[in-house]
């Protein structure tokens, strides 16, 4: 089928939630590159929105999925699943969590976190503690509870009345957070680097003070590491940069390198609040997704992709900083590891994204003035140099 036919079919039969998409259909990928049905090669600086950490077609992931698919794809969590137990053990071993529950997406993992926080206080005999404070500009998902948790009106307005219990405060403002806490509050939930709204970093002192405040007030601290987790920031989990451990954290996106999975991770004292019947999932933690997760985690650790994310992230931001001296349209460069945002001084993000696409580079845009990049952790200096050269040319010819 050619692209025009696919576009026509899509516009007739698919729900119009994405609007007009970038006009390409990818046929396959290898490493950091995607190959379109137009015969062109694209350098993927967006990594499926922080998902394809190993790039495309990585042999370790492809082998794990194919050999597991030949044996068993799904059997339900009514039975013991070897790869589920192994992935839970591996995640607990490399993180501050003691127990894990697998879902199929980030929003579902966050739903699980919200449920776990509520049930924890219910089982402690405090049923009126159900409120969760999250941050303005945050993004926690598209389900009704996670839309209410998300601190952006545009995602909430069409779906009111919202699920009760959520309050939103500005990031890095401890006083505002303290003022929002009342007798009903049970938890604080935050992204350490807000991704979807344009790569905004929390301050370390703020996060440390939030931890202290939660301890003093007896509140649970939840980190949404759906975008920041699994090496994206140069450490396996972003909380490692902050010297702070959450009571609960959530993962998804990169965890199985593209096979849908989410993970709710918690310390023992809170995890024990979930008892048989309190939570569940048909697909969550199935043999296929967990085998993929094992292959991704093992490859990231064995190939030291954390160091690569750290050094390539610094190099990338350094090269962008050099460009900003030449091109005044670059306002600010934000980021941690390979989570990178370019704040433009003009509303030209969409135009620039489209021009980069024409030149064979995929980036994301946030609103009209932010370019976002979340490349695979396997990215090399040559990939970055090639991108910087084209970006330089495009900015010069504005
Ligand atoms: C921080 C964060 N939380 C939650 C989600 C929702 O994840 P999903 O789209 O897998 O439901 C996202 C997705 O972009 C995210 O970035």
Image (cartoon, rainbow, N blue to C red):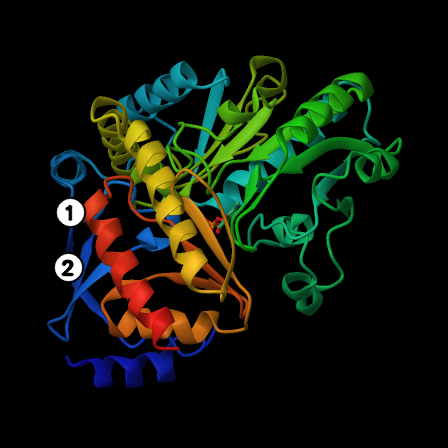
Image position, residue 275 (x, y; %): 58, 22
| Residue 380 showing in the rendered view | no
- Mark 1 lies on a secondary structure that is loop
Occupied quadrant, residue 306: top left
Q: Position of residue 85 (x, y in %)?
A: 34, 20
Find disc 1 in the rendering and name its residue.
57
Question: Horizontal and vertical percent for residue 220?
Answer: 69, 25
Identify the residue shown where x is 60% and y is 23%: 246
Q: Decide if residue 246 is in sight here.
A: yes
Name, please, the residue furthest toward the front.
326
Secondary structure category for the residue under label 2:
strand
| Marks 1 & 2, CB-CB < 8 Å contact | yes
Is the residue marked 1 within 8 Å of ligand 1, measured from its CB? no
Task: Give the position of the C terminus as an image quadrant.
Answer: bottom left
Q: In the image shown, does 190 or 363 lie closer to the viewer?
A: 363
Q: Residue at x 71, y 39 (%)?
A: 172
User: Which mark, by number, is residue 28?
Assistant: 2
Instruction: Please tell me which residue lies in front, 383 or 320.
Output: 320
How crowded pointer 2 is (Cα within 10 Å; few <14, some 14-19, many 20+) is rated as few
Q: What's the mark number on residue 110?
A: none
Badge 1, how many Cα within 10 Å: few under 14, some, many 20+? some
Rounded to the nearest angstrom, the CA distance separating label 1 from label 2 is 8 Å
């Amino acid at each position: 089928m050619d692209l025009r036919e696919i576009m026509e079919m899509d516009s007739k039969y698919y729900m119009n939630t994405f609007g007009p998409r970038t006009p390409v259909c990818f046929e396959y990928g290898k490493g950091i590159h995607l190959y379109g049905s137009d015969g062109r090669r694209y350098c993927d600086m967006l990594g499926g929105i922080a998902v394809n950490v190993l790039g495309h077609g990585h042999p370790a992931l492809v082998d794990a999925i194919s050999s597991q698919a030949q044996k068993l794809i799904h059997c339900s969590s009514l039975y013991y699943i070897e790869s589920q137990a192994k992935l839970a053990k591996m995640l607990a071993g490399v993180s501050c969590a003691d127990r894990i529950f697998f879902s199929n997406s980030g929003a579902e993992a966050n739903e699980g976190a919200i449920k776990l926080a509520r049930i924890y206080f219910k089982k402690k005999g405090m049923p009126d503690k159900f409120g969760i404070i999250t941050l303005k500009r945050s993004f926690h998902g598209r389900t009704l509870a996670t839309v209410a948790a998300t601190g952006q009106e545009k995602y909430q307005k069409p779906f009111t009345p919202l699920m009760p219990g959520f309050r939103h405060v500005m990031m890095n403002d401890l006083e505002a957070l303290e003022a929002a806490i009342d007798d009903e509050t049970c938890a604080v939930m935050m992204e350490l680097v807000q991704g979807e709204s344009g790569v905004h970093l929390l301050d370390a002192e703020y996060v440390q003070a939030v931890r202290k405040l939660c301890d003093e007030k007896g509140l649970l601290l939840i980190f949404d590491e759906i975008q920041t987790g699994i090496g994206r920031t140069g450490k396996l989990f972003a909380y490692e940069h902050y010297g702070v451990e959450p009571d609960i954290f959530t993962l998804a996106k990169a965890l199985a390198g593209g096979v849908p999975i989410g993970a709710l991770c918690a310390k023992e004292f809170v995890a024990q609040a979930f008892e048989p019947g309190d939570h569940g999932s048909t697909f969550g933690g199935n043999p296929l997704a967990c085998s993929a997760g094992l292959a991704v985690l093992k490859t990231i650790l064995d190939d030291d992709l954390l160091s690569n994310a750290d050094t390539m992230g610094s190099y990338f931001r350094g090269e962008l900083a050099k460009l900003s001296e030449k091109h005044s349209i670059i306002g600010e460069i934000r980021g941690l590891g390979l989570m990178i945002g370019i704040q433009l001084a003009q509303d030209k993000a969409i135009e620039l994204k489209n021009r980069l696409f024409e030149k064979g580079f995929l980036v994301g845009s946030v609103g009209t003035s932010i370019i976002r990049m979340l490349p695979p952790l396997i990215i090399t200096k040559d990939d970055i140099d090639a991108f910087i050269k084209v970006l330089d040319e495009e900015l010069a010819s504005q």
